[in-house]
Every structure is written in structure tokens, then in C-alpha cells.
Image (cartoon, grey):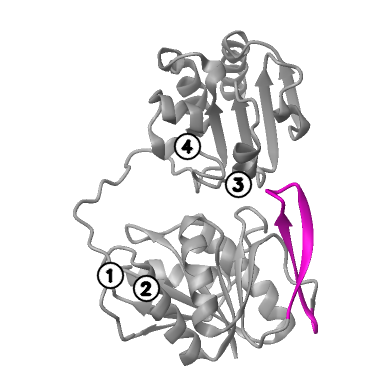
Amino acid sequence: MSVLVYTENWEGKFKKLSFELLSYASEIAAQSGDQVVALSIGKVGENELNLLGNYGASKVLAVGYDGELDNQVYTSIIAQAVEKEDATIVIMSDNFTGKALAPRVSAKLKAGLVTGAVAVPASFDPFVVKKKAFTGKTFVHVKVNTAKKVISLIGNSVEIKETANAISIEKFGATLPEAKTSVKEVNRLTGRILLTDAEIIVSGGRGMKSADNWAPLEEFAEILGAATACSRPVSDEGWRPHHEHVGQTGKIVAPNLYFALGISGAIQHIAGVSGSKILVAVNKDKDAPVFEVADYGIVGDVQKVLPQFITAAKELKANS
């Protein structure tokens, strides 16, 4: 039997989240005695596939499907891989892709589903997994009774661990159903740090006051090597592009460090960033909800605090 991990790649390169998933699967396999099998979909070179062995995979199933993400096609591929490898546990990321695929895979396999997992199963008999609930405000332990299980893992929940692992790569000729979607145009973001991969994120809200005030935030992010983001009202106003919107209705992120600058902390926004290890908030309203979840908070005008952040970051970088 095996633990199957769906590993995502970006233009032929695996994302950090894939290494997290494999590290998570390795911890499960160490207790269950199963092997870790990575499933790769898309055009990925052999050298890149071999990297998966460094994080616990003993086998890679490589599917050369080069079409755009179609949920029905990907669900079918994953289900076929589960059957081939006699997998009892399927692991994927709790991002947009995982949120679309996990329920479909669960239904197709008649498998129990745990979304938003944050830890290795507390026990295997019964099978119990810790996950976030109520938009990240609390944790619950979910018992899964089915023979097969599907788990989606929140980013940054586990430590990435490298291992010296022998790996075999097998081309998997899955039967592909007819795609139900047609992609007319694809515009990919290049030259920027992806929000889902960022270790540090600098995010602005309506406290930035206008689109013209974003230059200092971008400068601060550049000094830190961080990605830039925004709250939904900012993207709705057109101050920033929609791909920077983080929150329950935007991208779900889990960086090591998240700066919420001029963000009040609506529950929808907090739900999308609750996986952040450290959250630093700046808001002139001392009663802003964001301070209830922030690890560090500064009550002040972001327009005055941000230049001080920039000066401190430059000094830190110069002395490092």
C-alpha cells in the first residue's frame, strides 16, 4: 500500500508546497509502513522529478498531460493513480487547486475527506487528523472511518525535511476523459514572487488611502525579498491587481511573516492568512479586529510607520 501525493509544478518546476506535502506524507508513511508515491501531471524534466526523492518519495508517477487544469481530467488521473498504487491516503495542498480537486477525488473514491489539515494524524486506529475550523479561529480533531482518506494540507504547517531516498520514475499512461473546459488565453505572472510560495508577504489595505501611495509598500517588500498583496476592498477599488487579493475569497496564504498594513482585519481576510506563522499589523484604529490575531501590533498611521519600517529594513540588510 502507499500514500499518494499530488505534487504541483509551475511551468515544469515544483513548488515549495509540493516538498511540504512530501515531507508530511513521509511522516505518515514512517508510522504506517507504506511507501510515498508522488504523482506529477504536466511536462516536467527528469532532473526535476528526481528532486522529489529528496523529500521522501520513493516513486514518481509522471503523467505527460500538458492541457490546462481541468478538474474532471485531473480527478480521473488521481483516481487512476490511487487504484494503480493501492493508495489508502491521498494528500494534496489546501490551495485553490486542492479545494477544487479534493472533494471531487473524495467523492470518486468514496473516501473520507479532511480539508485544512495542520498536523500528522494523531492516531491511525482510529484515524484522527487535526484541522482548522471556523475560518482558522479554532482547531478540531476529525475521525475518518473510510478505508481510503483524502487530506488537504494547509501550507507552512509542517517542516520541510530532506532525505537521501532512492527513487524510481515511471511514465503513467492514464486514460484521459474528454476535457469539459476550453482555455482561450493564458496570462501568466512572471518576474514576481508567487504569493503561495512567499516566505514573507507585505500586504496593504484601505489604510493606504489610494493607489498612488503604494510605492513605499513595494519598496519595503523589495528590500525584504517579499511578495506584495492586498485586501479585497483594495482590489475591488482597482488600486491593485486581483491576483494580489488574499483572503477567504482570494488567495489562501501561509507565509512565515505577514505584514498587514492598513488592514482592519475583516473575518474573510483573516481566514485567508491565518496560517501565517507571525502576523504584524499596523492600523491607526486601536480597536481594529486585526489586533486580536496579530502577534505584533502597532497603533499608528501606516503612512508614517511604513517609512520607519523601510529605514530599519535597509539598516538590517546593510549589516547582515
Q: How far across and how far down the image is residue 170, in percent?
A: 38, 85
* Mark 2 and mark 1 residues within 8 Å of each other at the beta carbon: yes
Decide which of tag 3 and tag 1 comes sooner along the chain: 1
Q: Around disc 1, counting alpha carbons within 10 Å, would you say few (fewer than 14), some (14 to 19), or many (20 or more)?
A: few
Q: Between tags 3 and 2, which lies in front?
A: 2
Give me the C-alpha separation between circle 4 and circle 3: 14 Å
- Which residue has dot 4 on it? 245
* Mark 1 and mark 4 residues within 8 Å of each other at the beta carbon: no
Q: Around disc 3, counting alpha carbons within 10 Å, would you say few (fewer than 14), some (14 to 19), or many (20 or more)?
A: many
Q: How far across and how far down the image is residue 191, in percent?
A: 34, 38
- Which residue has dot 1 on it? 180
Image vertical order of residue 255 relative to residue 66, above or below? above
Q: Is residue 206 magenta?
A: no
* Mark 4 and mark 2 residues within 8 Å of each other at the beta carbon: no
Main SS, magenta residues:
strand
Image vertical order of residue 288 relative to residue 55, above or below? above
Give me the C-alpha separation between circle 2 and circle 1: 7 Å
Which residue does the image show at 37% across and 78% down from the upper left?
62
- Specify the quadrant that holds the C terminus: top right
> Given the image, on which type of amino acid does mark 2 rest?
Gln
- Which residue has dot 3 on it? 254
Which residue does the image show at 62% across and 67% down from the upper left?
23
- Which residue has dot 2 on it? 72
Q: Which mark is residue 204?
A: none
